[in-house]
Image: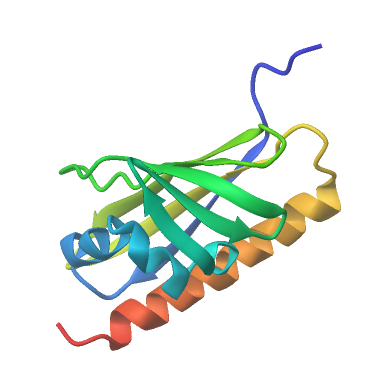
Amino acid sequence: MLVSTYECRSISITIDRDWREVYTFLARPENFPLWASGLVNGLEKSGDEWFADGPSGRVRIRFSLPNDFGVVDHTVMLGDGAEVYIPLRVIRNGYGSEVVFTLFRIEGMDEARFQSDAEWVERDLETLKALMENAPS
């Protein structure tokens, strides 16, 4: 039976930096290896897509086009053909920003793996926060 929706968890972090600066940083795929530990190895562009060595092997990534809305969604295509859609948003929060990452519990993912992935995302967002708050303006 096909699942029409997946359980999901929105994981966010407040960053004391103007949301436009955070968005500009995140909208450049080449910056992902600086904070997203799942995409640190071999990130390279080919045409409109990006490729990287992920935890489960070589992956193909499509990033959203630059926009004025803080949307930094991306889709990761795994070696087995499965696609993992990752909504990522930068939202103005006062004079700073809120970064929201939505994690889906995809078919076959048990609770332990879902929790582990959520913790991984939290660590990556903490890295992003430190990077953005400590970078010169």
| Quadrant hosting residue 90 | bottom left
110 displayed left or right of 75: right
Vertical placement of residue 107 versus 96, above or below: above
Residue pushed farthest top? Answer: 1
73 displayed left or right of 2: left
Q: In the image, residue 23 lies at what x, y percent?
A: 25, 58
90 displayed left or right of 62: left
Q: In the image, residue 128 lies at what x, y percent?
A: 41, 73
Front residue (pair 65, 93): 65
125 displayed left or right of 56: left
How many labels, in total? 0
Q: Residue at x 56, y 69 (%)?
A: 37
Q: Quadrant of the N terminus?
A: top right
Q: In the image, residue 27 lies at what x, y percent?
A: 28, 55
Q: In the image, residue 62 lies at what x, y percent?
A: 42, 41
Q: Residue at x 36, y 81 (%)?
A: 131
